[in-house]
Image (tube, rainbow, N blue to C red):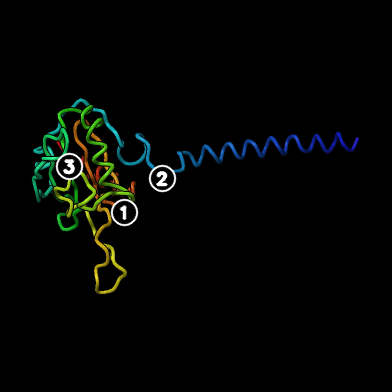
Amino acid sequence: MNQRKSGTFQLPFLLFAVIALAVAAIACGGSGDGEISESEGPIAKIDDTDRIYTADDIKNATNFKLDDDYDIEGLDDAIAAIYGFYGADPYSRLEYEVRFYADHATAMSTGVDFADEATGANAVILKDIQRWDEGLKDRRQCAGNGGHHSGKCDNPKYFDYVVVGNMIMLCQGKDTIASHQACADLMSVVQ
């Protein structure tokens, strides 16, 4: 009879433990790699809209300050690329590099590979390694140790990017969430 009571006690306890683990796994979600999926965060990582954006769509956005129209030679299949600053407060702006392709399919098939190379913790931002080095100095930021020296200047400025139709936006941020928020902020003023 003691075995029966012991078994009866263990079954509900085990059932509770399994349910608790399942709920915890669902609550944590994601793949565990720190990436934001296409539908999470302030903006979709990939928006396959049919709209065809032009550089003027970004240049004409409220409070966007154009700094450079890049030479796109070497940026395979691109039709334009620009660099500039945006912020709702004109005295507090972030930096952006926006690349344009003929359509969404081209942005995905060619452009994403170039964007992956220039963004994130594993960004390749050394001139001898990056395939397209136009604007490379703009993609770097310096990180120092707090002393009077600026430290090493081979850190990526853009942690992530988003694809919106035919456009790939590299947005300044210290991590994926900050970059995606910066992209969402700029897209909110694009007409």
Residue 50 location (% of width, % of height)? 20, 25
Q: Earlier in the sequence, mark 1 or mark 3?
A: 3
Q: Which residue is mark 2?
A: 34
Q: Which residue is mark 1?
A: 174
Badge 3: residue crowd in 10 Å (few <14, some 14–19, many ≥20): many
Q: Earlier in the sequence, mark 2 or mark 3?
A: 2
Secondary structure beneath disc 2? loop
Residue for point 24% across, 74% down:
148
Residue for point 48% across, 39% down:
29
Residue 68 location (% of width, % of height)? 9, 48
Drawn side of residue 120 relative to residue 69, left or right: right
Q: Along the line of sight, which residue is nearer the eye, 171 or 144?
A: 144
How far, Cα to Cα, is label 1 from label 3?
18 Å
Question: Tag 1: residue type?
Answer: Lys
Badge 1: residue crowd in 10 Å (few <14, some 14–19, many ≥20): some
Looking at the image, is 178 positioned above or below residue 169? below
Question: Tag 3: residue type?
Answer: Val
Q: Which residue is mark 3?
A: 98
How far, Cα to Cα, is label 1 from label 2?
13 Å
Drawn side of residue 72 relative to residue 31, left or right: left
Secondary structure beneath disc 1? loop
Question: Tag 2: residue type?
Answer: Gly
